Image (spheres, rainbow, N blue to C red):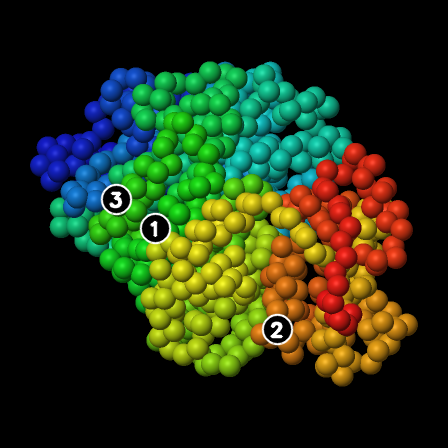
């Protein structure tokens, strides 16, 4: 039994072996497709063969379609030359169901395969012919997110792209340059309408495709290499559209166990091919049963009834919601968490990780507790049900040979979307608190631990490919599996990289927790497992530095404070704020003015620490005074001043680290920058604190003129009253 047109003539033999074969007249379909193509797809990889090609096959079998697919491969020509052509464009789809059942389908909906190669004159001429056809309705892509990029990791134009800008559309060498040239051929054929549809697994994929093609249109127009109307054609929504899509189907690389299963059926020539570009491809593809493809319904030349094949067509806003639901919460973050810790704990199958109670609790908590609260229900798919399917059916599927090592590929490119968007949503919410995120920081720490290239037992392993390995690995190169290391100094610069995490983790208030986790996981061999054991469902047994539950030891205490006390207004019957500062709504220039201008508690602590008076009430600069306070504070652990100072840094300035001599410069700059905001004026600081009444401490001989001014000022809603405290000394 050979997978080819000739080999499939003995249909009975294939069907006896349990294979579902195409039910349509393939020769007739091939002829109709080549004459009047409606769909050409770029990217001959596994996802296309397992998903889109099978959808079209089902519609052909049902008589809903009368034409099939044309596929074009623009990255690795050997896929077409060594896999598609020898097998007459047939593929065996092996669907591995969670209940253990296996479906084997011979997919024959692809009737023509071409290379996107300008040096292959016949193939490229055929592509131009296809693009010139009136019948062409959609051009789709699964070329990975990298395929749309015109620059390298440093932001520099790729050499082929730069050359194509100058040489024009006649014989481009870059991938998008070739696509743009083909679209130009369609423009020249009469500005015929078409939908250019990215189906890659990345957010707002249509925009990425548009941006790349439009850049070529702009450059070629600037260099007078195309007709002046081409750019306008690309930007005319009645002519060319770039719909957003969301795709979801797990299609691991062809697995040896599946290959053996097919060989036992008597199928020949199944050996996979590893191309010169390191693409692993076989005549078969193994995939899960679940699949989702949501598409913005924007097709200027019409479209077939693909919804009858299970695809969902909707408006752009809904696609966006579904994409964010999947990528930011319900699937991709859970996959990444399992990938990172799976590599560290020596797992070779994702499904096996779901038998691990600690890892199961980890992803359940990330999905249901930390992620789900920020998900907007898109309507077409229910978020909780989606997570249920992921964690109960898809990921635990023991018959899916997916690996943490595969999923760990390009993790640095994934964290910002898969977790950073959740952090941003928490920060923007009036009801959620970033500090409640305990396990997303654990994943970040786990990734940094993963970059050491040493598993939890101390055995070295190979890191999965990632474009930023050379950038980030040096930061952890000196870390070892031992206690007492200065982890934060090693990775602090990484934690500030918004391009990796989506946010500056220091600004977000999560850096301290990440460092704490990493310190725990590098203590010794086995520390990763021990750290996971400490994690409780719903949170972490490891608390962040002075977190939201600081001093709250019991659940009752937490409930009483967070649900009741924290929301109550403050009636401050004794404070040291100057009524003049309130009346004038003072805008402070720096943190020293806020903290040390008249705070005798801090002055006393500095004197006790042996600080010269010039740095307290004398003529030293504000920066010098702040430095001396920072040096004092690091020696005051246990003193309420230590607690007050750090709580103020957290709540008003978003700084969650420890103030000391080394961090003084960072804190100084951060606070002073924030103090420039009108929201940090004296009155607004009072408002932020939910204060409704203030009693200032006034001199008995004061004329109270500032109080009189405040009483007559209707613009400030907080009641400010004078007060006089009797007592000995000036310490109170």
Residue at 43% x, 63% y: name it.
553
Left or right of 247, for residue 593 = right
- In the image, which disc is placed on residue 639? 2
Residue at 24% x, 57% y: name it.
355
Left or right of 731, for residue 622 = right
Please state the horizontal and vertical placement of residue 166, each as a whole percent of the image: 72, 40
Q: Is residue 24 above or below residue 261?
A: above
Say which quadrant the N terminus sits in.
top left
Distance between the Cα atoms at labels 1 and 2? 39 Å
Farthest residue, direction bottom: 610
The residue that label 1 is drawn on is 364
For the residue carrying disc 2, how many other residues have a C-alpha within 10 Å: few (<14), some (14-19), or many (20+)?
few
**Of circles 1 and 2, which is in front?**
2
Tell me where residue 241 sits by quadrant. Answer: top right
Q: Is residue 526 above or below residue 588?
A: below
- In the image, which disc is placed on residue 393? 3
Please state the horizontal and vertical placement of residue 184, each as a whole percent of the image: 61, 27
Q: Earlier in the sequence, mark 3 or mark 2?
A: 3
Q: Is residue 564 above or below residue 608?
A: above
Q: Earlier in the sequence, mark 1 or mark 3?
A: 1
Residue at 63% x, 55% y: name it.
651
Distance between the Cα atoms at labels 1 and 3? 13 Å
Please state the horizontal and vertical placement of residue 523, each as a whole percent of the image: 44, 77
What is the secondary structure assignment of the residue under circle 3? helix
**Of circles 3 and 2, which is in front?**
2
Please name whichever residue, 164 or 351, is drawn nearer the observer in this view of the structure.
Answer: 351
Distance between the Cα atoms at labels 3 and 2? 53 Å
């Amino acid at each position: 039994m050979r997978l080819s047109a000739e080999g499939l003539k003995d249909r009975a033999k294939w069907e006896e072996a349990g294979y579902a074969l195409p039910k349509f007249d393939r020769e007739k379909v091939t002829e109709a497709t080549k004459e009047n193509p409606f769909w050409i797809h770029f990217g001959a990889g596994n996802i296309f063969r397992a998903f889109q090609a099978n959808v079209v096959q089902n519609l052909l079998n049902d008589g809903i379609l009368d034409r099939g697919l044309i596929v074009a491969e623009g990255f690795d020509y050997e896929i077409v030359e060594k896999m598609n052509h020898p097998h007459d464009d047939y593929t065996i789809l092996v669907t591995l169901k969670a209940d253990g059942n296996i479906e084997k389908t011979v997919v024959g909906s692809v009737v023509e395969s071409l290379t996107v190669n300008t040096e292959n004159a016949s193939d490229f001429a055929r592509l131009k012919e296809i693009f010139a056809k009136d019948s062409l309705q959609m051009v789709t892509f699964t070329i990975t997110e990298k395929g749309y990029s015109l620059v390298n990791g440093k932001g520099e134009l790729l050499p082929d792209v730069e050359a194509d800008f100058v040489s024009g559309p006649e014989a481009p060498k870059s991938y998008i340059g070739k696509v743009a040239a083909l679209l130009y051929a369609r423009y020249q054929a009469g500005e015929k309408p078409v939908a250019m549809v990215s189906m890659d697994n990345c957010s707002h994929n249509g925009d990425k495709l548009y941006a790349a093609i439009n850049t070529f249109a702009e450059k070629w127009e600037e260099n007078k290499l195309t007709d002046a109307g081409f750019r306008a054609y690309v930007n005319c929504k009645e002519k060319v559209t770039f719909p957003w899509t969301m795709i979801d189907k797990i299609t691991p690389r062809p697995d040896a166990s599946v290959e053996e299963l097919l060989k036992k059926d008597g199928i020949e020539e199944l050996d996979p091919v590893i191309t010169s570009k390191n693409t692993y491809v076989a005549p078969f593809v193994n995939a899960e049963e679940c699949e989702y493809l949501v598409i913005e319904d924007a097709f200027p030349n019409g479209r077939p009834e693909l919804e009858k094949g299970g695809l969902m067509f909707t408006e752009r806003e809904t696609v966006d919601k579904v994409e964010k639901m999947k990528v930011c919460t319900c699937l991709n973050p859970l996959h990444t968490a399992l990938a990172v810790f799976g590599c560290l704990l020596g797992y070779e199958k994702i499904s096996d990780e779901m038998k691990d109670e600690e890892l199961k609790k980890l992803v359940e908590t990330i999905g249901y507790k930390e992620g789900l609260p920020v998900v907007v229900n898109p309507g077409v798919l229910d978020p909780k049900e989606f997570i249920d399917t992921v964690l109960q059916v898809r990921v635990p599927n023991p018959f899916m040979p997916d690996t943490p090592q595969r999923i760990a590929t390009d993790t640095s490119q994934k964290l910002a979307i898969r977790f950073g968007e959740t952090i941003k949503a928490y920060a923007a919410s009036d009801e959620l608190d970033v500090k409640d995120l305990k396990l997303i920081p654990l994943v970040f720490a786990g990734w940094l631990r993963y970059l050491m290239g040493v598993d939890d037992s101390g055995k070295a392993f190979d890191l999965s490919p990632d474009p930023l390995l050379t950038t980030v690995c040096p930061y952890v190169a000196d870390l070892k599996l031992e206690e007492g290391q200065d982890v934060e100094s090693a990775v602090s610069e990484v934690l500030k990289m918004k391009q990796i995490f989506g946010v500056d983790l220091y600004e977000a208030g999560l850096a301290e927790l990440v460092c704490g986790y990493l310190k725990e996981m590098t203590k010794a061999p086995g520390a990763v497992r021990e750290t996971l054991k400490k994690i409780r469902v719903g949170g972490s047994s490891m608390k962040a530095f002075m977190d939201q539950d600081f001093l709250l030891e019991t659940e009752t205490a937490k409930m009483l404070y967070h649900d009741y006390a924290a929301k109550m207004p403050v009636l401050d019957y004794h404070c040291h704020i100057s009524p003049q500062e309130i009346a004038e709504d003072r805008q402070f220039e720096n943190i020293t003015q806020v903290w040390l201008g008249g705070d005798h508690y801090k002055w006393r602590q500095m004197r006790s620490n042996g600080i010269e008076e010039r740095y307290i009430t004398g003529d030293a600069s504000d920066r010098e005074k702040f430095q001396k306070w920072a040096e004092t504070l690091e020696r005051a652990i246990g003193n309420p001043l230590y607690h007050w100072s750090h709580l103020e840094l957290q709540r008003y300035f978003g700084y969650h680290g420890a103030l000391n001599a080394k961090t003084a410069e960072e804190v100084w700059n951060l606070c002073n920058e924030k103090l420039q905001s009108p929201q940090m004026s004296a009155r607004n600081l009072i408002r932020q604190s939910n204060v409704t009444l203030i009693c200032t401490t006034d001199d008995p001989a004061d004329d109270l003129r500032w109080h009189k001014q405040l009483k007559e000022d209707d613009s400030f809603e907080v009641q400010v009253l004078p007060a006089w405290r009797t007592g000995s000394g000036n310490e109170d």
